Amino acid sequence: MIDELDFETYLSISPKKIGIYLLDKKKLKNLYFKEQDLENDNVFFDFYILKKFLDNNIFKIEKLLGKFIKNIILIIESENILKINVGLKKKNYENIISKKFLENSLFELKDLINENYQDYKILHMHIISYLFDEKYSDKFKFDMNCKNLGIETQFISLPNNFILEIEKILENFHIKTTNYLNQNYIRSLFKEEKIELSEMAYKSQLGHNTNEISIVSKNVKKEGFFEKFFQLFS
């Protein structure tokens, strides 16, 4: 039996291929993987094929583990993926830029996207650049004198109805989705490395892109937003 803390299960879905991977997080090797090429010229994904693919593979993984799969991470590529670039410029009346000031600015941007794209789920939010007064930077600088802060960000989102269709199928196997990743985005982070998709997904969640911001529920209050959820300053 494999210790549940030592592995992670990924399901990748794209118009041309679906795959499932059981990753050993310590050795960064797939204990199980299966991929299936799709011959589908239709822009709409065939969810029946996904159901059949999972029927053929979930039991095999659970037999290998000696336990049921409870959670899975989705890696999605779809023509329905929406990329939104949005910026914000704010006057800083305290002159010194603080973590709290940046935190509030990023919350404003996220809330703006959620308000205007209510039928979409944010998969990734990352910062492209900062503007400290008139100086551009790709890194945040703590406690510097700055009267005006500008932030350029990109959001990568997917329609909720697409996600719900996948989750309905996973419910048949009593599996819940714990995270959603965009395949093209995580591949872009590791384009110089020859590693498996599952390893890319795992490393991306650990903060490989230091300008990516983890999207979390608003009801999480115990730890500070920066300390627990931002990958910017690792």
Image: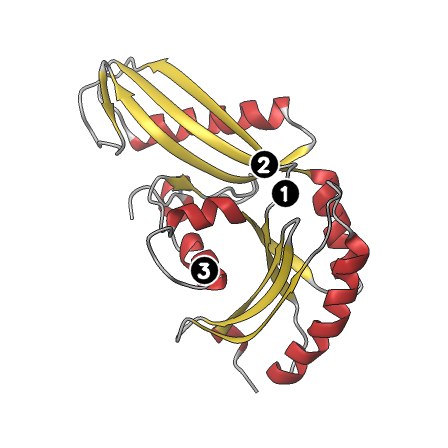
Q: Amino acid at mark 1?
A: Ser
Residue 174 is at least partly visible in this image:
no
**Picture mark count:** 3
Callout in the foreground (2, 1):
1
**Percent of width and height locating residue 19:** 62, 63
Residue topped by disc 1: 78
Q: Is residue 104 left or right of residue 56?
A: left
What residue is shown at x 26% (from left), y 32% (from top)?
A: 140
What residue is shown at x 68% (from left), y 59% (from top)?
A: 176
Q: Nearer the viewer, residue 58 or 42?
A: 42
N-term mark: 1 or 3: 1
Task: Give the Cα distance between marks 2 and 1.
Answer: 10 Å
Residue topped by disc 3: 202
Q: Secondary structure at mark 1?
A: loop
Determine crowd level at label 2: few under 14, some 14-19, many 20+ residues with C-alpha closer than 10 A: many
Residue topped by disc 2: 157
Residue 107 is at least partly visible in this image:
yes
N-term mark: 2 or 3: 2
**Percent of width and height locating residue 167:** 73, 53
Quadrant position of residue 91: top left
Q: Amino acid at mark 2?
A: Ser
Q: Can you tell which mark lies on residue 4?
A: none
**Percent of width and height locating residue 118:** 67, 28
Q: Is residue 164 left or right of residue 133?
A: right
Q: Secondary structure at mark 2?
A: strand
Q: Nearer the viewer, residue 140 or 158?
A: 158
What residue is shown at x 28% (from left), y 20% (from top)?
A: 131
What residue is shown at x 40% (from left), y 63% (from top)?
A: 195
Q: Amino acid at mark 3?
A: Tyr
